[in-house]
């Protein structure tokens, strides 16, 4: 016994907000009602539960939907749904065992608004009322465990005839028809073997092509060696570059690493290039000399510094010291010229130890420092006295103000409230107080005058005397700040100056008599023009045509830019090296020719073995293909009779009800009206006849190959006339009475007619009238 569908529950899916079907044990279930009342929804639910998708929706999605457009609703969700998940649940019996399967999505608010059948998760329930959990969630492979690996293809080709596209198979090309039903013939083992051997064949072919290419290249190489081979007398080895290691300059030259052409080729070989450099080394060295000199001449500012400063660099330490002393002396003199007591007390006029160490006149220094300290002490006393006098004056003024207020408000007399002396009148008392204030101010002025007098004596005597000594001391300095500017003391400039001087030394240019030896001002009489002109005249003329672009690289890489190394290498040394390399290469060619011939023989043997293997694989592939064709032909014959009978009984108005033929030629399946016809029947049949034809073919496939004993037909007679319909019902009733059939129609008369015919054969039937929402 095959599959027996017992119950189906649908919730929030397409036209059904919530619907449950109970089919019990009926063999024929007929759905009738107008279009749009849920007949196709039932079949879509069944297809989705068993296969995990709806095939025609997949086709729509790939052909009609622009994924760039935003979608606002999910086409599978019921318009009046309650927001809960889409739930599809089925109970069916298979081989005496009841199974309960469910497909369920996320709730509506978590559901994407585009077609994605991956959203329908599969669950295996314990009973029809069971709920889905992570523990009973399954993959689609679960169904194949009991219905078989091909159950999805079986459903598409054997169990289900769609209303929407019943001509799906007929409209495919002849080769695709064969591929679509090839799984029914159980030829996978054949095809796997054929594909495996074809893969081996392709690989062997690639190997064979590769061997052929390698043989061609090797034969060309052998011919080239034969053309190049020559006899050369033995030559003694001598090394050109003692301190360097080059493959071509070694005793045992490896020509697989360094080719003969790269060593001795006339235009590109390294040895001819070195020889050319040696032959023109005089002109090359002159060019190197001029480039170095150009490097010097480009540094005009540096040369200017060298002109002014180079002679004095030997006294650099002394000049640095004198610069520091001059700065100290100048700052001291400037401060004394603009004397202030603030700077005095900040010790700005104190003699730095560096100055004292250099001045020989200890008496003048001692006198200066003595008077300077006396002046500091006097200023401190005067400053303190001034502060005391200021406070006394402030107190005196306050006292005078308070006394005046006292005599006005309290007692009008001349008695002093502090000492009790009677001055006769208030006015006399106040006048006496004012005279004391004036005496205090005069005393303060005398103190300031005395301090200023002491300062003036210090500046005109000790300070002036010291300044004279310091200025005389500076006159003997080599350092002159107008001459030695900041660039003389800059370390980066000095480093650059030394680099340029080193180049001039390398070029053996003596410029010592052309640079400045006096620290006179840098005026028109002391300019570097003559020095620069002298350097410009040191350039050497040479023949530029003798120079090659690669000379610089060779000079740097092989001679380390060392003139002596270049001078020591002779043309004779290079010619001897050339003879030695030719001798070693002649030995290499002899050995190489032997090796290449051995390699050629090995490749030819490998190619021969490969071709033998290729021939064997070709024979195997041909044999398997012939066996597969023979097997397919036999299988086509197995369904050919059923198809011919069913098509004749259903398509009774075509060719007098003789039926159609299915043929398999060159791996292509055709439905033809006669065995000798070449065009497919689709070109000579009406839509109604074609619909009857595909029903006949599906029923033949189901009868021959389906083990599930299940047939779902969605509105099969839309385009079939009464005669074809009657034939169709007769085939169902007679040949499929052991199969559970689900049939839909929009015609109530047909629903009644089909159930009547089946009941006559005592086959249980069930009617679902979807527009009346009841069953019979």
Image (tube, rainbow, N blue to C red):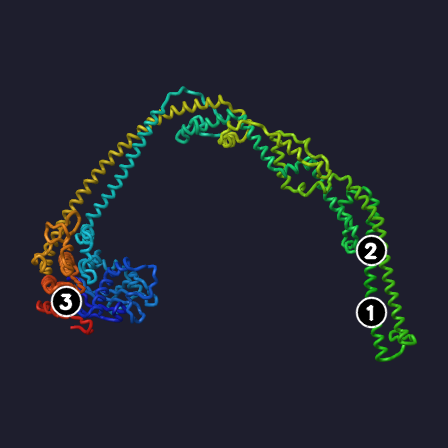
Task: Please name whichever residue, 58 or 157, is drawn nearer the observer in this view of the structure.
Answer: 58
Between the residue at mark 3 and the residue at mark 1, the CA separation in whole angstroms equals: 132 Å
Q: Which mark is on residue 28?
A: 3
Q: Quadrant of the C terminus?
A: bottom left
User: Element type at marker 3?
Assistant: strand
Assign a secondary structure to mark 2. helix
Quadrant for the N terminus, please: bottom left
Could you say where residue 393 lies in the image, as x and y percent from the top left?
83, 67
**Label 2: few (<14), some (14–19) or many (≥20) C-alpha neighbours in 10 Å:** few
Report the mark closest to the observer, 1 or 2.
1
In which quarter of the view is residue 623 placed?
Answer: top left
Residue pushed farthest top? 233
* Closer-to-camera residue (708/504): 504
Q: Which mark is residue 377?
A: 2
Q: Are marks 3 and 1 in contact (CB under 8 Å)?
A: no
Quadrant assignment, res 345: bottom right
Residue 719 left/right relative to 234: left
The residue to which callout 1 is attached is 395
Instruction: Examine the image and state in which quarter residue 659 appears.
Output: bottom left
Q: Who's the residue at 60% across and 31% down the image? A: 506
């Amino acid at each position: 016994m095959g599959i027996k569908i017992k119950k189906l529950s649908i919730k929030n899916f397409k036209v059904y907000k919530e619907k449950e079907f109970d089919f019990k044990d009926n063999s024929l279930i007929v759905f009738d009602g107008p279009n749009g009342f849920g007949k196709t929804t039932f079949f879509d639910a069944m297809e989705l539960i068993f296969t995990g998708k709806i095939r025609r929706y997949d086709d729509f999605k790939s052909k009609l939907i622009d994924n760039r457009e935003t979608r606002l609703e999910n086409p599978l969700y019921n318009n009046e749904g309650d927001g809960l998940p889409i739930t599809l649940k089925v109970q069916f019996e298979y081989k005496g065992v009841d199974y309960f399967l469910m497909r369920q999505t996320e709730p509506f608010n978590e559901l994407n608004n585009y077609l994605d059948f991956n959203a329908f998760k599969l669950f295996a329930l314990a009973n029809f009322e069971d709920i889905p959990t992570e523990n009973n969630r399954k993959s689609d492979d679960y169904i194949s465990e009991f219905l078989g690996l091909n159950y999805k293809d079986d459903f598409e080709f054997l169990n289900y005839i769609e209303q929407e596209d019943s001509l799906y198979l007929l409209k495919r090309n002849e080769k695709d028809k064969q591929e679509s039903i090839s799984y029914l013939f159980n030829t996978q083992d054949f095809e796997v073997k054929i594909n495996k051997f074809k893969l081996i064949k392709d690989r062997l072919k690639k190997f064979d092509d590769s061997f052929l290419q390698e043989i061609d290249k090797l034969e060309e190489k052998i011919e080239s060696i034969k053309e190049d081979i020559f006899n050369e007398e033995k030559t003694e080895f001598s090394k050109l570059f003692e301190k360097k290691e080059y493959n071509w300059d070694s005793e045992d030259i490896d020509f697989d690493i360094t080719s003969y052409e790269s060593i001795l080729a006339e235009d590109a070989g390294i040895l001819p290039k070195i020889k050319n450099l040696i032959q023109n080394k005089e002109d090359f060295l002159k060019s190197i000399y001029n480039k170095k000199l150009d490097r010097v001449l480009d540094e005009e500012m540096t040369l200017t510094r060298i002109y002014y400063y180079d002679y004095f660099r030997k006294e650099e330490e002394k000049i640095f010291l004198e610069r520091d002393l001059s700065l100290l002396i100048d700052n001291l003199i400037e401060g004394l010229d603009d004397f202030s007591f603030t700077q005095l007390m900040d010790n700005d006029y104190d003699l730095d130890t560096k100055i004292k160490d250099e001045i020989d006149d200890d008496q003048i220094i001692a006198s200066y420092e003595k008077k300077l300290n006396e002046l500091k002490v006097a200023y401190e006393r005067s400053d303190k006295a001034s502060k005391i006098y200021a406070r006394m004056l402030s107190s005196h003024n306050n006292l005078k103000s308070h006394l005046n207020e006292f005599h006005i408000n309290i007692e009008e007399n001349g008695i002093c409230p502090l000492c009790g002396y009677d001055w006769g009148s208030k006015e006399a008392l106040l006048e006496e107080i004012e005279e004391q204030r004036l005496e205090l101010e005069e005393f303060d002025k005398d103190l300031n005058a005395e301090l200023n007098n002491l300062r003036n004596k210090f500046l005109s005597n000790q300070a002036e005397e010291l300044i004279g000594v310091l200025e005389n001391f500076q006159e003997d300095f080599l350092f002159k700040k107008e001459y030695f500017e900041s660039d003389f003391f800059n370390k980066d400039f000095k480093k650059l100056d030394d680099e340029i001087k080193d180049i001039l030394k390398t070029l053996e240019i003596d410029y010592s008599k052309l640079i400045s030896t006096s620290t006179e001002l840098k005026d028109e009489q002391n300019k570097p023009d003559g020095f620069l002109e002298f350097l410009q005249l040191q350039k050497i003329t040479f023949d530029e045509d003798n120079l090659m672009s690669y000379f610089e690289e060779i000079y740097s890489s092989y001679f380390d830019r060392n003139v002596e190394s270049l001078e020591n290498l002779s043309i004779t040394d290079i010619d001897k090296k050339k003879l030695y390399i030719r001798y070693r290469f002649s030995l290499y060619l002899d050995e190489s020719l032997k090796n290449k011939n051995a390699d050629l023989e090995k490749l030819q043997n490998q190619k021969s073995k490969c071709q033998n293997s290729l021939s064997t694989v070709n024979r195997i592939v041909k044999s398997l293909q012939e066996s597969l064709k023979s097997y397919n032909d036999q299988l086509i014959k197995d369904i050919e009779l059923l198809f011919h009978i069913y098509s004749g009984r259903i398509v009774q108005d075509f060719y007098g009800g003789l039926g159609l033929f299915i043929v398999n030629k060159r791996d292509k399946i055709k439905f033809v009206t006669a065995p000798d016809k070449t065009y497919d029947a689709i070109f000579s049949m009406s839509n109604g006849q074609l619909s009857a034809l595909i029903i006949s073919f599906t029923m033949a496939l189901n009868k021959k190959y389906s083990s599930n004993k299940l047939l779902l037909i969605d509105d099969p007679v839309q385009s079939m006339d009464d005669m074809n319909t009657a034939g169709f019902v007769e085939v169902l009733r007679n040949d499929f009475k052991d199969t559970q059939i689900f049939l839909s129609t929009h015609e109530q008369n047909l629903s009644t007619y089909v159930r009547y015919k089946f009941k006559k054969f005592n086959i249980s039937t069930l009617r679902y009238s979807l527009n009346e929402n009841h069953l019979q």
